[in-house]
Image: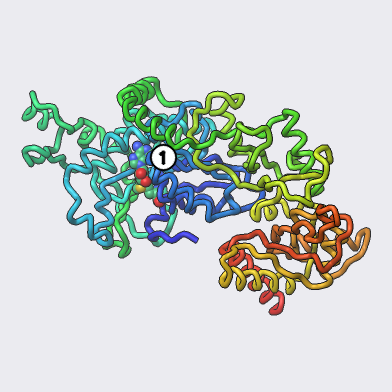
Amino acid sequence: MCRQELVSMIPVKLLDAQSHHLVLDSCASPGSKTSQILEVMLDKHASGAVVANDASLQRANLLTHRCYRLEAAAKNLLVINHDAQTLPLELENTFDRILCDVPCSGDGTLRKSTDLWKKWSNSSGVELHSIQVNVVTRALRLLKHDGGGRLVYSTCSLNPLENEAVVVELLKRSQGAIRLVDCSKMLPGLKRLPGLTEWSVQDLKTGKWYDTYDSYAKDNQTRSTKIKKSMFASKTTIHAHNLERCFRIHPDLNDTGGFFVAVFEKVKPLPMEMIALDAKEEQKLSRTTNANTKKWTKAKIAPVFSVGTDKEFKAVIKRIKTKYGFDVRKKEENGGMEMITRNNTDSVPKRIYCLSKGAKSILDKCNRNNQEQKLRILACGLCAFERQPVHKGILKSQSDDSNCEFRFTQKGCELFQDCISKQVVRVSPKELENMLARQQKKQSITSKPNAPLCIDAKTKKKVLNECERGCVILAIRGKSSGSGNKRKLEEEEIAAISPVTIACWFPPSKKKRSDGKSNDDDDDDDDVTLTLMCSKSEGEVRLERLREHLKLKLVN
Ligand SMILES: C[S@@+](CC[C@H](N)C(=O)[O-])C[C@H]1O[C@@H](n2cnc3c(N)ncnc32)[C@H](O)[C@@H]1O
């Protein structure tokens, strides 16, 4: 769960993102709003994508950490590290929704951020105005114009230079390609003020206030300053822009922080003049872009590769299928998921990640033929499989297809729980609760994070009869067992009731033969333990979910 102030939730509410949408959060760290957007992607079948960007690599790392808490939406997530003013144009006309929660002076947060009282200066708004215009201009290029593309602009500032002046400049530049959406009927009960139509701009050097750019220019003919024409409200045109459609939330209205929001829709492609201005700004920024590229290269973050059709990958997929009974690349079996890896140095990947169709389509646009990678991807997708270091007693001969070196991650087995048909042991909800509780206890008293657990006799038998050593999935069983239609019913019931599936490790037999090799062919149930592979926090969440479910079952 992610907490943020109530007003901070308004931009995402107005974004109205759907589970099939491609969404860009252009200035996303620390990720409160990205997490809010990701909530629509929690559904297993959500095919959309959320691309969360931040210009600072350090802050993008923080963003990754925060967003990955929403595990079930990880399949839809890409975290990238670009200056939002120069995001790759390969993504032009791509996104259904874009949030530009831009860097701002933050004066709307003065009630809670007491440190800002010392830091704030009148120059912040002036310095940020152009960046804010540039960030949204680039975002508008990436927004779809042929299917109701919507962009939400927000700041936690009340300074008109960072708000209405930015909005008016964008509307002017776009020559009708974008318009402000009337949100007056949305969020009833929220007290708000319309956007300002008049304001003054202060010359930072002289302290003098001006209402028009002409009067300012008259006094400043020779001096070059940061004051731009776009910062002024032009009395002749301002009323044509429907600024009453912007939201101004002043702290006293709802007893919150101050906030500004404007919602745009793009109705046609941007005019050439606006695109030319964007290109000019990109040129100006090339020096900082190069510095960021250097930082990125130094961080040595592994590139992303599609799981290809080459022989080695095909063999991996076949081994996964033989071991777990489902084909991860068959869309009808895997819920439309795409597979990627982040490693091209080994012939066999270390990890296999799942991505939604939408997230993969974004990668493909920027990453043609696994060649030049235009997106600086920090994190992407849900890690479903990990290559297990070779274990004696598990791997058979190298050529054996049942010799699968990949194990499910905890998140992977949950994503694919409906498809896995081998290596699954069904236990009662009570037994699973008991195992999770014992693991929690063990984890708090031993330094070994994942110690093996002894299991009850019935489960032992099942593990021995139904599974090979290696990765085993523990799932909840339905009430009755049977065959034919009855069995089908049971499976449907399981799918409906099963709130928890746990990836476990069934270690190789400890019993040695006289030649010193492990005694795999002669298993006996004294030698059966399972290690739950979920971390302490993962286990804690699942235990809570299971107990909640059991409580509900008792009540019903
Ligand atoms: C207002 S904060 C975003 C807060 C975030 N939306 C949330 O709700 O958690 C602005 C973010 O923009 C980032 N930023 C600043 N300049 C940027 C730029 N040119 N491009 C992309 N991100 C930028 C900052 O690092 C900061 O994390």
Up the image or down, 337 lies above or below 292; here it is: below
Residue at position x 7%, y 41% from top? 207
Q: Is residue 245 left or right of residue 49?
A: left
Up the image or down, 273 lies above or below 440; here it is: above
Residue at position x 80%, y 47% from top? 323
> Can residue 60 be seen?
yes
Marks counted in the figure total 1
Image quadrant for the C terminus?
bottom right
- Of the pair 167 and 205, the residue shown nearer to us: 205
Residue at position x 32%, y 46% from top? 244
Residue at position x 54%, y 39% from top? 22
Residue 498 picture quarter: bottom right
* Residue type (three-letter) at the residue carrying disc 1: Phe
**Residue at the bottom extreme, as displayed:** 555
- The x, y position of residue 76, in whole percent, is 58, 45
Up the image or down, 370 lies above or below 507; here it is: above
Up the image or down, 397 lies above or below 91; here it is: below
* Ligand 1 shown in quarter: top left
> Can residue 263 be seen?
no
Residue highlighted by disc 1: 264
Q: Is residue 454 left or right of residue 58?
A: right
- SS for tag 1? strand
Callout 1: CB less than 8 Å from ligand 1: no
- The x, y position of residue 317, in whole percent, is 75, 39
- The x, y position of residue 550, in whole percent, is 69, 74
- The x, y position of residue 422, in whole percent, is 82, 53
**Residue at the right extreme, as displayed:** 484
Question: Dot 1 surroundings within 10 Å: few (below 14), some, or many (20 or more)?
Answer: many
